[in-house]
Image (cartoon, rainbow, N blue to C red):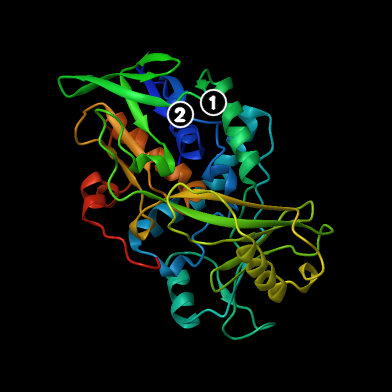
Amino acid sequence: MHELTTLKSNASAIVLGAGVSGLSVARALLQRGYSVTLLERGEAGAESSWAGGGILSPLLPWDYTEPLSRLALRSMTAYSDWIAAIEAQSGMHAEYWRCGMQAREVAEPDTALAWCHAHGLAAQRDLTQSRDNLWLPGIAQVRNPRLVMALREAVTRLGGVIHTHCAVESVSSQGGRMVAVHTLKGTYMADQFVVATGAWAGSALPNLPAAPNIRPIRGQMLLFKLEPGVLDTIVYRNGLYLIPRRDGHVLVGSTLEDVGFDKSTDGATRLRLHAEAAELLPALADVQPVQHWAGLRPGSPDNIPIIDRHPDFENVFINAGHYRYGVTLAPASAELLVALMDDTSPAFDPTPYSWQAALERRWIPGR
């Protein structure tokens, strides 16, 4: 995957949403010669982009559908260079770290290993623990808040304009094209529009139908502080993951809760996550979390996002519904969306990420 940097367009674009998905698209458009304005309802990157752990892979890659895997593997291959370019543009460090991941108590390790080998993902049995444990040395992570700051700075240095606390109230259209979005801070006009509003993409605005089958899914996480080096790899077991940072912080997550736009936390979940984490890393048993928070993922069936033109407007596009993997999928998602906006041939089949495909997918309890 190579970044599109050729100056091509003098068009203007408005991106609704300044999380990782919106910022990534804005950066790609700026590099194509667009003038870009981002409108963010809160602070840039302060929702799921900030709240997540930053593992740059589906948790168990072999457990997902091929469309999700294709998008993820393309992004994972590109991530190191993508991050390096953002850091060079911004002068900021996103803390990309290829620390590897231990996947413990894998249900069908032989099947998992075969999938990894077929898809070019390095994997082997971790015999120091159990035959059912796998070691994936190529899995990387990024520190989400640092990535958001670097992306925001890169976008600004490239000429993008970001308006925060600027929620869209309604839109105006004419002849199958959107012409303006209206906010409490004023009206904004552009040639093209991108909806990258995360969990809010599934909520309709006046004159703008909601994206299908996207809804908020809450995830609660804990943060601990240990000495640097106590844990130096991601550890995953039965839905729980531990993510080390180089400075000794350890993130523990996460829950999947279908509770609407409620970002509250609760003590019972805190105790459960702490106890399960201490089973994997006994050093956590005698320390208390320094932070407990919740974020709202843009949930979608099968974790497959919508990356497509809006069916009602020829100049409106959507990049939303990445569920647990918005940070993971950011490079390839932006690449695909910009190709669609520029009407150039995508590097891979866009059909699984279409609006129509999203209409046909169904939510399965527990997924």
Please tell me whether residue 284 is drawn above or below residue 47 in the rendered image.
below
Cα–Cα span, label 2 and label 1: 7 Å
The C terminus, quarter of image: bottom left
Give the labeled residue for mark 2. 26
Q: Are marks 2 and 1 in contact (CB under 8 Å)?
A: yes
Q: Residue at x 36, y 25 (%)?
A: 169
Q: In the displayed orientation, state which residue is furthest to the bottom.
A: 131
Q: Residue at x 59, y 79 (%)?
A: 133
Does residue 336 show up? no
On the image, the x and y values in percent for residue 26 come to 45, 28
Q: Kindly identify which numbered label has been placed on residue 155.
A: 1
**Tag 2: Cα neighbours inside 10 Å, few (<14), some, or many (≥20)?**
many
Q: Residue at x 53, y 41 (%)?
A: 47
On the image, the x and y values in percent for residue 294 come to 57, 51
Of pointers 2 and 1, the one earlier in the residue sequence: 2
The N terminus, quarter of image: top left
The amino acid at mark 2 is Ala
Please tell me whether residue 103 is drawn above or below residue 67 in the rendered image.
below
Does residue 163 show up? yes
